[in-house]
Amino acid sequence: MSGQIGQLPRTHHQELKASFRRLAKDLPSLPGHYVKSLFPIASWLPSYQLEWLWGDFVAGLTVGLVAVPQSISYASKLAGLPAQFGLYTSFIGALLYALFATSKDVTIGPTAVLSLGVGQALSTYASGASTADQVLFALTLAFWTGIIQLIIGLFRFGIIIDFVPIPVISGFTAGAGIQVIISQLPTLLGIKTVNTNNAPIQVLIDFFKAISTSTQWDSTFGITSLAFILLIKFTTDYAVKKRGITWLKYVGFLKNTIVLIIYTGISYAVKDNKNLSFSIVKTIPYGLTGIQQANYGVSYASKIFPALPGIVVISVLEHIAVVKTYGRVNGYTTNPNQEIVAMGLANSLGSLVGAFPATGSFSRSAIKAASGVRSPVGSFVTGIVVIICLFSLTNALYYIPSAVLSAIVINSVADLVEKGKLAIPLFRSDIFDFLGFAVGFIVVIVSSLENAIYASVAWSLLVLLFRIARPRVQILGRTATGAWIDPAADDYDTPATSSVSVAPETSVPTGILVLKIDEALTYPNSNYILAIAKDAVLHRFKYTNTETRRADKNWSDTTQEQYKALEKKKGQDTDPPPNLRAVVLDFSNVTHVDFSGFQTLLDLKDDLERYTGYPIPFYFAAVRRTQIRLLLGVPLHVIGADRNVTAGSVEGQQKKWFKFKQTPEEAAAQEQRDLAALEYFFTDLDSAVEAAVGQTTSVVQGAKATVNIV
């Protein structure tokens, strides 16, 4: 018959043997490939073109000039650490990442969200500690964060990141952006009595209560610098996009640096005026003289471990999101596992030179890409620029106004807040994605980053499990054009008065039930699929097992009573339902069948036999070849026995279903049974339905089934 599968696939034993042979063949080359994958620079550096150098230099220089004010701001205003540690984190992250990166656009260093996470970890787990102890905690946190990231990357566990969807990450980052802005409002106005490590709602309440205590000159520096930054931003955007003055984009990139230089100059100019009181950064150690190292002792690690999960998840999610975004936009392939390795090395080795946890930066990566970077060499340039700053500008950095740093932070997270615009299309497209966005966003606003991360991950796993456990099971009908659809499942049954399109008329051969499962058939969803299938039969087909006495049925079997109640509800004016002839299963979307799923099909077969009083054949369409061997047992209809099940027949001789070794005669007999069962498997749905119709014609008339089930 057309569309019928005529050849048995390999057994699982044969598949395993073939897999081991392939592994043995590839094994000698695997260690070399693995080691080579850890050093991407070895593949791209030999082919580096000198003409790329100018683009890398300009991009690296631009990002370096952006990284200096951002790093100082994030360290002092968000992480709650001395400003120099932001610079240490920035230069070592850029240098190490360039050696192991698979992305040319990404820059590793302090970021707003991760720095805020570090600050909240210090507030929670090192509250009341001295500045030196908090620095030690942050550096040790970086070391262990890097170790965990190395384990994830080296053992190629990066797949775990795929379990957190983009909407959840977007909601979390948008909420985190708002939390960052709220946390900077007190410093922007010189208010010193607000604990910015509280939940954002509480910070906002305390801010308005204490707004009368704001200082004149801090407020002046903060508000005017923020306005100046925004003026440069919107002016340059207009000039570039509307007037075509493309070189002004670099002025826009450097807006934070320009404003920082101007206001630091003003601060220096009025340093001797005792009537002007405002907060400044003060001493930043020259060069690398302020470097400290983490505590690498295992005993101290116990203090760090409670903060680790949140910091690791934030850093990995943020970094992979940046890497994937710019790899997709600029048309090159990235390796998430290798990226996690690069980040792990930057964090673990960075702790040797005073770095706190770092990850990929959205804002600096955007600037780097827009500046025309050609390779990871741009990161080397960025690192060198930051080092030059440490050795030449620390005296000038002394006079940076604190309020200006808050203005820089607020401007830098604007892109994160803009991710909130994703909520509207999510609401229109998928309610679960919208709720995932809302969970990440709301928990950040009312609680902390750590709690928001846990809530976001928990929601993602919950939705994933729900979708596995409650897949869509469609009852298909064929349209006049030959397409198979489920009008109810596809929302085609909407009334004609609605703006939604109404389904075309569908039909299915009398007595044939066509089911399509849109998920793997496994233990979490097997009972649900069984219930859906039985309910479909109850509502569509006649109950024909009337010869079995009630006393001979199971005490809990009320199927006949349910059927009568449904028929009574329909009324006498409706046509009687047809006899069930066969079940056709569309497995085109079923990626896996485990033993529980297999057992479910057998249970369904038994239940339908009790419903009809005669055997019901199952026909399969579009089954993956790896699943056929297991599903052959459905036509054979055995668990622990081989049976010849024909209408009214007595079960044949029992045989063992599984033996480690078969005799040649047994193997040949098994092969014949499998080939006979293979007659119920087809490559397409139309062929399967055609076979079901042709082999079950007697059931249409209401007669007992005469189909010979293998």
Image (tube, rainbow, N blue to C red):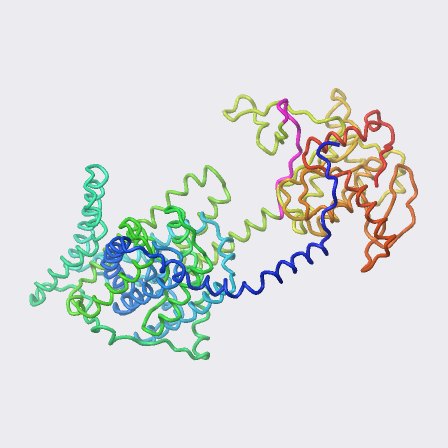
> From the image, which quarter does the C terminus lie in?
top right
Q: Kindly indicate the quadrant of the structure image that contains residue 425.
A: top left
- Report the front residue among 236 and 453: 236
Q: Is residue 433 left or right of residue 520?
A: left
| Residue 475 among magenta residues | yes
Q: Is residue 252 left or right of residue 196?
A: left
* Magenta part of the chain: 469-482
Q: Kindly indicate the quadrant of the structure image that contains residue 509.
A: top right
**Where residue 38 appears, x then y in whole percent?**
45, 64
- Report the front residue among 264 and 45: 45
Q: Is residue 469 left or right of residue 228?
A: right
Residue 533, placed above or below residue 10: above
Residue 339, placed above or below residue 698: below
- Residue at 51% from the left image edge and 44% from the top image edge: 432
- Residue at 23% from the left image edge and 63% from the top image edge: 385
Q: Is residue 213 left or right of residue 23?
A: left
- Report the front residue among 691 and 159: 691
> From the image, which quarter does the N terminus lie in?
top right
| Residue 480 among magenta residues | yes
| Residue 414 in sight | yes
Residue 493, placed above or below residue 54: above
**Where residue 58 appears, x then y in whole percent?**
23, 54
**Where residue 177 appears, x then y in whole percent?**
34, 53
